[in-house]
Image (cartoon, rainbow, N blue to C red):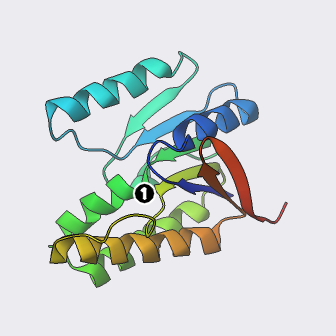
Amino acid sequence: MIIYITGGVRSGKSRFAMELALQKSGSPVYVATSRIRDEDFARRVKRHQDERGPEWVSLESEKDLYLLPLGGKVVVIDCVTLWLTNLFEAFGYDVGKSLAAFKAEIDALARIDATLIIISNEIGMGVHAATEAGRKFTDLQGWANQYVAAVAREAIMMVSGLPLTLKSTK
């Protein structure tokens, strides 16, 4: 089962997802899709790690998340934006190949017997990217977000720390 949580930067997505996971499991899994690129980002990752208690199992994977041992678990995947960045780079900034790889990964994850809480930044609520690569990435993330939302059993949008249910097929 996939629960999709989207919203703007600093909207409370991760906090909400982690609270939801802890309600569903005493030992949830946190999958970080990030690649440490600079000191500021390293500090942010460390802060996130420190916020998680000892009950969390933490895994890191830039892609191929379906290969991780997730069966039977409650899993927070944080986040689609960084995951897509990794795929976009791996496929030479080709939107079509990156999107196809992402959809294949989502389909493989959906077949795992687990509760997957997938976090993503919402696209289209800010300024247009100034570069061609940025515009291509915006397209990629917009299409990827739509795909996850369509596959998900539940879709929630975070606005100013408040969850708004977009879809629920409970």
Residue 160 percent location from the top left of the image:
59, 44
Say left or right for 59 vs 6.
left
Q: Amino acid at mark 1?
A: Val
Say left or right for 168 vs 122.
right
Task: Identify the residue at the far front of this view.
Answer: 127
Task: Identify the residue at the far bottom of this view.
Answer: 96
Residue 122 percent location from the top left of the image:
48, 61
Residue 110 percent location from the top left of the image:
60, 64
Residue 9 percent location from the top left of the image:
44, 48
**Is 111 placed above or below 48 here?**
below
**Is 143 placed above or below 19 here?**
below
Name which residue lies at 24% across and 68% down: 88
Q: Crowding at label 1, few (<14), some or many (≥20) Cα neighbours within 10 Å?
A: many
Say left or right for 45 vs 68.
left
Name which residue lies at 41% across and 27% down: 48
Question: What residue did someone put label 1 on?
Answer: 80
